[in-house]
Image (tube, rainbow, N blue to C red):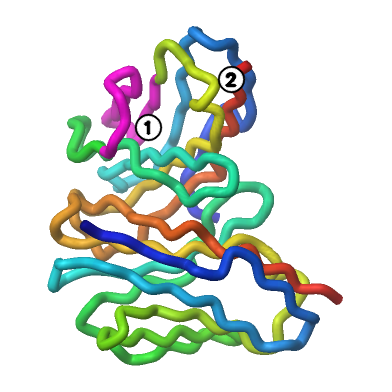
Amino acid sequence: ETGVTQSPTHLIKTRGQQVTLRCSSQSGHNTVSWYQQALGQGPQFIFQYYREEENGRGNFPPRFSGLQFPNYSSELNVNALELDDSALYLCASSDRQGFSGNTIYFGEGSWLTVV
Amino acid sequence: AQKVTQAQTEISVVEKEDVTLDCVYETRDTTYYLFWYKQPPSGELVFLIRRNSFDEQNEISGRYSWNFQKSTSSFNFTITASQVVDSAVYFCALTGSSNTGKLIFGQGTTLQVKP
C-alpha cells in the first residue's frame, strides 16, 4: 500500500479529445511526478510539481499539462489526443522537492487507450 | 546524459532457481540514487530498494539481494530460490542531483518463474 491512488483506472478516448487523469498522494508528500509508460517500455518522465508549481519537465509537448493542489492531489491533462498517447500513466509522490534520495511511491496507474 | 541499461529483456527460470537481473547505469553526477521497482500485471510500480552513490555495501532482504559496484557502474539484483509470485517486470532506475529528481528508467526485465 503506497498511499498513492489514481483515477480512472482505465479509459478510452477518441483522437483529438482531451483527457484529465487524477492522482491523490500521501499526506505530506509535496512533490508529485507523472510518467508515461508505453507498452513494453520503461516509464518516461513527463513533469514534476512541487508546492503547486511545475519543477522540471521531460521531453513532452505543451499539450501535456498538470496541476497540483494544496490537498496533495494533482491532475494530468492531455489535449488533442493522438494515437501514440495510448499508454499507462503513472503518478509518483515523495516528501521532498527536486533531487531527492527519498523513496518515491507510485500509484497503480491509469490505462489510456486512444482510438 | 543519464542512462540506465537493462540488457536482459526476458528471463525464464524454474521455481527455486536463483536469478540475477543486471542493471548498468551512466551518470556524471557524483551524488545519485539507484532504485529497483517491481511491476506486476496490475501496473503499479512496487518499490524494492533505494541505494545512494556513497554506500556500496551490498544489501540483503529475505530472498532479495543487491550488488552495487561503482567501478563497473552496475547495480544488480538477485532473487534466491525464486517463486512463481516473483514473476513480474523489474525496473532499475536512477536519479541524480542534475535532473531535479526525475527517475530515469531502464527498459525493464520480464521475469517468468515457472512452477
Q: What is the quadrant of the N terminus of chain B in the image?
A: bottom left
| Disc 1 crowd, CA 10 A, few/some/many (<14, 14-19, 20+) | many
Find residue A57 and report its horizontal and vertical position in percent.
24, 37
Find residue A101 and report its horizontal and vertical position in percent.
25, 65
Q: Which residues are magenta?
A: A58-77
Q: What is the quadrant of the C terminus of chain B in the image?
A: bottom right
Find residue A1 and report its horizontal and vertical position in percent.
55, 55
Q: Residue furthest right?
A: B115
Chain for numbered disc 1: A
Residue type for callout 2: Val
Q: In terms of depth relative to the viewer, which is nearer, A23 or B52?
A: B52
Q: Which residue is mark 2?
A: A114
| Disc 2 crowd, CA 10 A, few/some/many (<14, 14-19, 20+) | some
Chain for numbered disc 2: A
| Structural distance between the alpha carbons of marks 2 and 1 | 25 Å
Q: Which residue is mark 1?
A: A73
Q: In terms of depth relative to the viewer, which is nearer, B72 or A96?
A: B72
Residue name at image x 39 percent, y 67 percent: B35
Callout 2: SS: strand
Q: Earlier in the sequence, mark 2 or mark 1?
A: 1
Residue type for callout 1: Ser
| Vertical comparison of B20 with A95: above or below | below
Q: Is residue A72 magenta?
A: yes
